[in-house]
Image: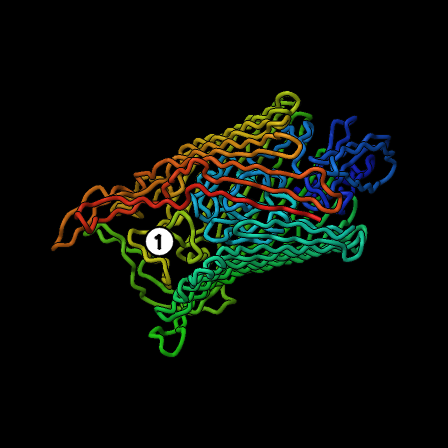
């Protein structure tokens, strides 16, 4: 009904207005630019380009001055006459031919005070490349940890946590394709090659209706299209890993290609010492782009990555992501831009244990068809709507013997299948000059499809409570049924409203508020705060309910000194229903009846985020602080049951009360730039033993309540210096990056283990620390 009203309104309005639309590109490469400001100063209005560089705006007949501005590029001003629908493309020149680092312009760094968009962080790739990084490798995920509300479970941990959410509650997209594991080498590196990335945006709240399927955050990353004017290459050589990327025209000014690869090679040094162990990763990014006409464009993008571990040929492990996306951009008119995508995503995990004699394979695949519309009705009313349809294939695990001498029998956990559909409509509405809103509705449904064997339990309870010992136990099936893949055994449907408001007091001050409800139908089966590749994904079904989020946020935003300084403050509260919790002693590995060790609980998180930035001058950077609490609770299903942790709230495994990050960059001279970041975080929750008793010469520890203790606080200082030789050749550019990770050699605690000392018989705690001080050097080049 809303769509019909909007279209009718658009037809009536269109009688006196005309559309101005087009694409904004980089003049040197024809690369489309995302988030460019296209402004009409005389009308005090404007728009920004979408993820494909397209913009559209409605104007009454007349003569207008159009101003196009973007960070790091020269501002373009053009006078045009509007008397009919007009297509106008812009080519922007980089601010400097020798630009190696980000150039800050006050107009571009001002907070978008009037936009209802909030709880969103954007980092340019040039900014990310300046940050000190472990092992000399620039890391997209590590850069996110310097933002307020974002953390992880410590060094060497995979993924990231947003506003007290778990790792599996983040939707990570690379060119719209889902990435199920964002880390290489168990979190030491991320899967994203920074040279191939064009745009990065992290939604922590106020999430638009086009996104769904996760209840914590959305990390939306787009790869570059490639240079359609001339051949270019760039790369870097580091101590542990190197990378190389090439791009160029297929047909000049119409088609382009981009191919990039990375690999680590530290394991090769082990070979020199006759050490048979190895641990390395490699990945490949590719993208093809072709302009069929002024209204049609085809894009194909892909990613393939693998991690490989080998210990004495007895333990072999490899895992990674494979994604492909074929997209068609089509412009129906000056008002309607569409994108049709066919996406395939595959996460694979393989393990070989020769000393046991078996191979293990598991993974998750999905096939997704998306059709999205951007409908520009007028300068005060814009629509986004579309439909997403996804088919899932879950392989929880398959065990097979290595050879005929193996004592292992073939065993396969039951495969699971599901379909997730969603339809959405979002409205960007300028209600008044100082009051804007973005609201929408997403309708999602989830169909759990049949599987070979599905257990049935008495009273439909897969977990039973033993009041005598006050413990939960696995229930025994009373029956088993078989279903075909085409049968639907469980259906869930959810309405997910979204609302974001912004009220500006003036051009430099505003308050914003947002609410969003989201549903998540997939669950990561893991009882660790940092997922490992062995963890598996499971769909909602008869015993696992979808997670439902309600999140509220309110914030105050201000620019100072014409945008030289900015301040962002936000308070948030989020509540999640049906969060999976595990009974004490739960066995999660190769468990074909996972429903017998889990219960549906709930979680909540609330906090305050502050971010202050200095945008201009030789010294730039930001300070972020987060004060938050993340808790989980699983009460008993009946008054007689004690629940988990006696049914009380307990700290989530990734809860951090205080999280402080300071990031600074200083231009020392024309050739040198100094960068640093300091991090302080409250220690992670843990469960420590508080005593023990002896039973028949067996020492039995007594533990405190779940996560009632904490590890020591985490802090470190990283520094780096970038040297750029001058003058730089027009055809070949290079730089050196020297870095030191953990400058003062802080031995941060990764874990504490409690055991009896075999020498003196005393109980003791042993601390495990992963990293001390780590120097690095990387040579970067482009030609």
- Horizontal and vertical percent for residue 507? 66, 23
Question: Outermost residue toward the bottom?
Answer: 404
Q: Is residue 47 visible?
A: no
- The answer to which quarter of the image holds residue 497 is top right
* Element type at mark 1: strand
- Horizontal and vertical percent for residue 548? 46, 45
Horizontal side of 55 relative to 717 (left or right) equals right
Q: Residues within 10 Å of mark 1 (few under 14, many from 20)?
A: many
- Horizontal and vertical percent for residue 112? 64, 30
Instruction: Tally the marks.
Output: 1
Question: Outermost residue toward the left?
Answer: 696
User: What colour scheme governs how the chains and residues are painted in the rendered image of this protein?
Assistant: rainbow
Horizontal side of 481 relative to 611 (left or right) equals left
Q: Camera-side residue: 390 or 254? A: 254
- Residue where numbered disc 1 is placed: 598
Q: Is residue 540 above or below residue 602?
A: below
- The answer to which quarter of the image holds residue 715 is top left
Q: Is residue 545 above or below residue 92?
A: below
- Please tell me which residue is depicted at 46% across the width and 49% down the height of the picture: 158
The N terminus lies in which quarter of the figure? top right
- Please tell me which residue is depicted at 42% across the width and 69% down the height of the picture: 359
- Please tell me which residue is depicted at 79% across the width and 26% down the height of the picture: 42
Q: Is residue 355 visible?
A: yes
- Horizontal and vertical percent for residue 266? 49, 55
- Please tell me which residue is depicted at 74% across the width and 36% down the height of the picture: 96
- The answer to which quarter of the image holds residue 246 is bottom right
Q: Camera-side residue: 610 or 251? A: 251
Question: Outermost residue toward the front?
Answer: 273
Horizontal side of 575 relative to 457 (left or right) equals right
């Amino acid at each position: 009904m809303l769509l019909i009203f909007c279209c009718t309104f658009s037809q009536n309005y269109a009688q006196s207005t005309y559309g101005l639309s087009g694409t904004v590109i980089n003049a040197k490469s024809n690369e489309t630019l995302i988030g460019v400001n296209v402004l009409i100063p005389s009308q005090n209005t404007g728009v920004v380009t979408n993820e494909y560089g397209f913009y559209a705006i409605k104007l009454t007949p007349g003569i207008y001055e159009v101003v196009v501005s973007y960070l790091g590029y020269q501002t373009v001003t053009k006078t045009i006459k509007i008397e009919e629908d007009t297509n106008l493309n812009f080519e922007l020149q980089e601010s400097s031919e020798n630009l190696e680092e980000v150039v800050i312009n006050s107009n571009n760094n001002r907070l978008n005070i009037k936009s209802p968009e909030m709880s969103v962080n954007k980092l340019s790739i040039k900014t990310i490349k300046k940050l000190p990084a472990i092992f000399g490798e620039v890391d997209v995920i590590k850069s996110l940890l310097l933002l307020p509300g974002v953390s992880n479970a410590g060094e060497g941990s995979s993924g990231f946590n947003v506003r007290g959410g778990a790792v599996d509650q983040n939707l990570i997209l690379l060119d719209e394709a889902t990435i199920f594991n964002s880390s290489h080498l168990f979190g030491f590196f991320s899967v994203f090659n920074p040279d191939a990335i064009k745009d990065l945006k992290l939604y922590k709240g106020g999430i638009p209706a086009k996104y769904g399927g996760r209840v914590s955050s959305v990390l939306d990353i787009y790869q570059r299209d490639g240079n359609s004017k001339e051949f270019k290459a760039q790369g870097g050589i580091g101590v542990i890993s190197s990378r190389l990327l090439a791009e160029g025209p297929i047909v000049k000014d119409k088609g382009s290609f981009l191919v990039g690869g990375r690999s680590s090679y530290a394991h090769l040094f082990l070979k020199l010492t006759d050490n048979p162990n190895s641990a390395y990763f490699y990945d490949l990014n590719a993208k093809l782009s072709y302009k069929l006409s002024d209204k049609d464009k085809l894009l194909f993008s892909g990613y393939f990555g693998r991690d490989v571990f080998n210990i004495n040929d007895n333990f072999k492990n490899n895992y990674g992501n494979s994604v492909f996306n074929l997209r068609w951009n089509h412009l129906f008119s000056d008002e309607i831009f569409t994108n049709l995508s066919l996406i395939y995503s595959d996460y694979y995990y393989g393990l070989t244990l020769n000393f046991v004699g078996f191979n293990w394979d598991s993974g998750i695949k999905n096939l997704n068809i998306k059709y999205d519309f951007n409908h520009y009705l007028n300068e005060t009313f814009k629509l986004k709507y579309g439909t997403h349809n996804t088919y899932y294939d879950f392989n929880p695990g398959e065990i097979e013997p290595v050879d005929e001498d193996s004592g292992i029998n073939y065993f396969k956990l039951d495969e699971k299948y599901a379909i997730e559909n969603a339809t959405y409509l979002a409205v960007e509405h300028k209600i008044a000059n100082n009051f804007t809103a973005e609201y929408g509705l997403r309708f999602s449904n989830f169909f759990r499809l049949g599987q070979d064997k599905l257990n049935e339990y008495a009273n439909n309870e897969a977990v039973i409570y033993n009041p005598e010992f006050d413990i939960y136990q696995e229930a025994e099936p009373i029956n088993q049924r078989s279903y075909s893949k085409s049968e639907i055994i469980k259906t869930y449907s959810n309405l997910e409203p979204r609302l974001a408001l912004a009220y500006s007091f003036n051009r430099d001050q505003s308050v914003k508020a947002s609410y969003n409800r989201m549903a998540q139908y997939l669950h990561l089966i893991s009882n660790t705060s940092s997922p490992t590749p062995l963890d598996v994904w499971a769909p909602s079904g008869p015993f696992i309910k979808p997670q439902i989020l309600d999140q509220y946020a309110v914030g105050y935003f201000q620019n100072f000194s014409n945008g030289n300084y900015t301040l962002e403050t936000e308070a948030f509260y989020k509540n999640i229903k049906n969060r999976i919790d595990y009974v004490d002693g739960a066995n999660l590995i190769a468990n074909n009846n996972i429903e017998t060790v889990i219960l549906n609980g709930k979680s909540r998180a609330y906090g305050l985020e502050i971010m202050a930035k200095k945008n201009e001058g030789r010294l730039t950077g930001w300070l972020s602080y987060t004060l938050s609490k993340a808790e989980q609770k699983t009460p008993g299903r009946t008054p007689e049951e004690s629940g988990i942790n006696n049914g009380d709230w307990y700290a989530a495994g990734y809860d951090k009360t205080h999280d402080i990050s300071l990031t600074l960059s200083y231009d020392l001279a024309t050739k040198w730039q100094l960068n640093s970041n300091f991090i302080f975080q409250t220690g992670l929750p843990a469960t420590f033993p508080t005593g023990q008793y002896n039973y028949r010469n067996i020492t039995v520890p007594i533990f405190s309540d779940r996560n009632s203790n904490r590890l020591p606080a985490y802090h470190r200082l990283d520094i780096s210096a970038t040297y750029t030789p001058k003058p730089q050749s027009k055809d070949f550019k290079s730089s050196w990056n020297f870095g030191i990770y953990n400058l003062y050699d802080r031995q941060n605690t990764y874990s504490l283990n409690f055991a009896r000392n075999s020498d003196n018989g005393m109980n003791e705690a042993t601390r495990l620390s992963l990293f001390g001080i780590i120097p690095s050097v990387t040579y970067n080049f482009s030609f």
